[in-house]
Image (tube, rainbow, N blue to C red):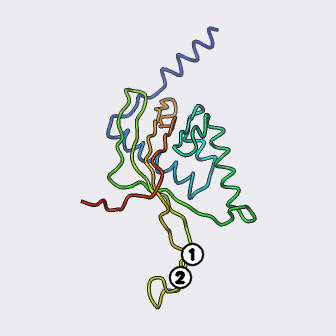
Amino acid sequence: MFTAIALLLAQTATAAPMPEPAEARERVAARDAEMFWYAFEGCDAGEVRARIADDFRMVHDQGGLVATNGDDFTAMIAEDCKAREEGGRNAGYSNRRMLVPGTDEITRLGDWGMLHRGEHTFHELRQRPAGHYGEGDPGGPTWVMTGGAAFINVWLWDGANERFIMQETISIDHGAARSYPPEG
């Protein structure tokens, strides 16, 4: 028991305090970009897992409580990535998530985390037919916006590893993306 208490005290003593607000916002924005790149374009479940908490939860307006822990969520990402491989049911499929500029807000939550909310759009890589952009257009791959949504993410400060990890995401208002730039 003494060893366990000593270990706990040693871990607490070496944990770094959460960065000041400006740096914390920059770190969360960077982690957000990494997380969604690995989940969509990078299709790397291991990298996604490195950015989420063990008790990660995802709530989705269309799917309900989608994930109740980091391992289950990572397994869903891995399954999706496998389906994109040659011979898979979604072979060759590629998509991306893009943050809508000017919509994100990152707010400090005490000394333990950050709340990140905003809007994002979703895009799929599709084949553009020849001539779409005029007579000389040979056609080819192009990104097509397929929809949008709002999000609310809770990022925990992991002082032992000096990083933020996502603990919860709430994904809402899925549908057609708002026009950009916004009207008015």
Q: Nearer the viewer, residue 23 or 57?
A: 57
Q: Residues within 10 Å of mark 1 (few under 14, many from 20)?
A: few
Mark 1, secondary structure of its residue: strand
Q: Amino acid at mark 2?
A: Gly
Q: Position of residue 19 (x, y in %)?
A: 38, 34
Q: Which residue is mark 1?
A: 127
Left or right: 116 as drawn, with respect to 124: left
The residue shown at (58%, 46%) is 48
Mark seen at residue 84:
none
Query: Above or below — where is 160 with respect to 1?
Result: below
Q: What numbered label is drawn on residue 139?
A: 2
- Marks 1/2 in contact by CB < 8 Å: the verdict is yes
Q: Please tell me which of labels 1 and 2 falls first in the chain.
A: 1
The residue that appears at 60% across and 33% down in the rendered structure is: 54
For disc 2, the neighbor class at 10 Å (few under 14, some 14 to 19, many from 20) is some
User: Looking at the image, which residue is at 48% across and 26% down?
Assistant: 15
